[in-house]
Image: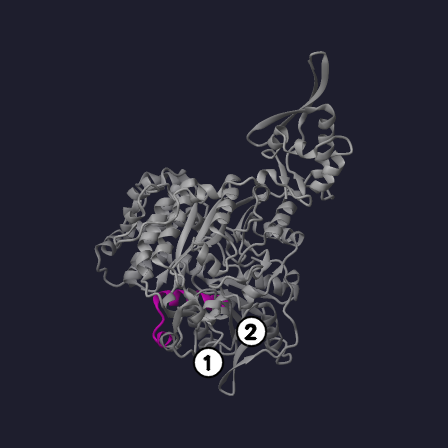
Amino acid sequence: MKDLILITPPFTQLNTPYPATAYLKGFLNTKGISAFQSDLGIEVILSIFSKNGLTQLFQVCDQPQTFNSQRIFALQDDYIRTIEAVMAFLQGKNQTLARQICSGNLLPQASRFEQLDDMEWAFGSMGMQDKAKHLATLYLEDLSDFIVECVDENFGFSRYAERLGRSANSFDELYDNLQSEPTYIDQITIQILAEKLHAVQPKLVCFSVPFPGNLYSAFRCAQFIKHQHPQVKVAMGGGFPNTELRELKDKRVFEFFDFITLDDGELPIELLYDNIIKSGAAEFKRTFLLENDQVVYCNNTTKSDYKQSQVGTPDYSDLLLDHYISVIEIANPMHSLWSDGRWNKLTMAHGCYWGKCTFCDISLDYIKVYEPIAAKLLVDRMEEMIAQTGETGFHFVDEAAPPALMRELALEILRRNLTVTWWTNIRFEKSFSRDLCALLKASGCIAVSGGLEVASDRLLELIKKGVTVAQVAQVTRNFTECGIMVHAYLMYGYPTQTVQETVDSLEMVRQLFEIGVLQSGFWHQFAMTAHSPVGMNPEAFGVIPQINDITFAYNDIQFKDTTGIDHDKFSFGLKKSLFNFMHGIGLDYDLQEWFDFKIPRTKVAPDFIEHSLYDSAEFKIKPSSRIVWLGNNPAVSTTTKSKKGTTWELMQLVFHDKNNQCEIVLDLQKGEWLLAQFCLWSVHSTTNTTIAQVKADFETQFEDFELFWFSKPMLKLKDFGLIIL
């Protein structure tokens, strides 16, 4: 028995748990509050995609109408026979099956496999394991198509009935759907939920609802609890209510939920626990509830939210970590990171250190309240999570990870000799120098994603992004040269954006891919949200909002752009071109080739990005810059050299890294000086040595530090572990 259950309703990710409940369970541990957590999404998926699940599914399905569904129905015995072996393979438990999958003789194939010819030319050859994962993913997607057509039109692997949750200003449609009989997916969900409730017997059930695609299932589950376990209190928190339910007025919502909390969940859930389990004072933090048959917002506690240093380490216990499945959809390199592999989720900093972008919800606490976590505490938590989960991969889910904290995190990882793999979201700050990127790579960073948005300096300034296209090009170059993959979030249809700017933005993106400094990207059409500067002051951005009466969800706002441009028509051409650019195809095409309507010629110079990369940063140093040596100790030998009767003593130093070696030769005295410095510069050293200190020490014995520092031997060391931060 536990006091409460934390639940993520169907569906989010297949490969890794959504982290909200693990964060909350970690916090509750610090308070001695017993909690059980469940990701209903993965458990429902595992129930459906099993031998028994598919057998039942084919029995309850409607009569297939399309050729594709008729084919799948006809092949049902093959699907039932293979499903458990395929799921085990995708869970990493049956790797020898890859050869049979790749042979083409195991899996039944429907329409998704028609993409295979295109995949071959677009993506080239993959390793056998990845190719088998991709084929198994197509196999599951065929089954998903069948479910949507013949069983439940609302089904999706990472969402369920998402349409009902998207900008539902009124609760009417969702409420009406909840009065109908539970769907086939609902029945499976409720059966699993019922088993959890029987085993745990909680007094409080808390649903974390991150996205619109989790909302319907949360309500359906809450409805079941209210009917079958009326004594149990039910609460909802998470990303969806935090952004969408801030204007909640419809009291029918409280037929399903007793409480709906906003923003950081730690203190609100602790107070709910005190009220329900401990019968404490009726204190609440940012909580909607029903009083006297009216919806009220209660924020009557004097207690402050917890600092990030106080919330504990995320706790993944109870979750079926070895049952998640890795899939490879393959259309996008960064998307494959999201869907393939088990990642421990952590946050370097609460909120966003920039907090100015005009399209972003900067008025809400999850963006507005910025609080970084000390690097040592972060790595402590990483080590705890490795011990708990057995996984060494980390996805830092920051709004934008701070460069200075990323640097300290990398140094701390290296000091502790940890072998980890990690990636995160960033702003394309100019502080991401080549040396900082090299440090991040050495610590295990494999990828970053960041917002280029509209690749137009005028619009970037209007967005208040704080970057220029040239700066983004330089930063992406620095990451790429260090072997870190770069994904760019791209935007079109921003208010006042002209057709010319859309075309020029595409040309900038084309050049970034052509020159090889960008490996992945995705176009999003601008969406106006209620809590962004554009949403709060639309007239200043040339848009006219169209707002209905708000009684339920309120975030995405329909609007008209005063330019009158139909940005929708650019969607297909932008995405098609990007799909090809990511795989080195069509980079020499005229931009007109991607569109079936007339577009203007680009005004961007064909070598704009190339020229943006010309800089002499390599020969600029700040006295306050810190020196770090990541390399190994060199092999040392001495020789003498004579010329015209003059003899020099020389030192030869040979350095090895994982792939190469380099040799430098210095005067003996300078070589001895340099050898002594390596200990001081070591990442394990307790002293932070600056350029100014090194220069002062050098010049006690020699002259012209700059001539020495930028000499060919010293420049060689930059590829073997010499980092300037």
Q: Is residue 587 above or below residue 148?
A: above
Q: How is the image coloured?
A: one colour
Q: Is residue 82 visible?
A: no
Up the image or down, 370 lies above or below 139; here it is below
Q: Quadrant of the rendered structure where residue 650 is? A: top right
C-alpha gap between disc 2 and disc 1: 26 Å
The region drawn magenta spans 176-197
Q: Please provide percent x and percent y for residue 591.
A: 32, 48
Q: Is 178 within the magenta?
A: yes
In front: label 2 or label 1: 1
In the shown orientation, is residue 533 left or right of residue 117?
right
| Residue for badge 1 | 249
Residue sitting at x 21%, y 60%: 65
What count of labels does the image hold? 2
Image quadrant holding the C terminus, namely top right
Q: Nearer the viewer, residue 444 or 538?
A: 538
Q: Amino acid at mark 1?
A: Lys
> Is 261 displayed left or right of 717 in the figure?
left
Q: Position of residue 314 (x, y in %)?
A: 59, 58
**Which residue is tagged 2?**
203
Mark sitting on residue 546: none
Amino acid type shown at disc 2 = Lys
Secondary structure of residue under mark 1:
loop
Could you tell which of marks 2 and 1 lies nearer the N-terminus? 2
Q: Residues within 10 Å of mark 2 (few under 14, many from 20)?
A: some
Q: Main secondary structure of the magenta part?
A: helix
| Nearer to me, 616 or 52 | 616
Extreme-right residue of the structure: 700
Q: Is residue 722 magenta?
A: no
- Element marked by disc 2: loop
In the rendered view, tell whether residue 525 sits above or below residue 197: above
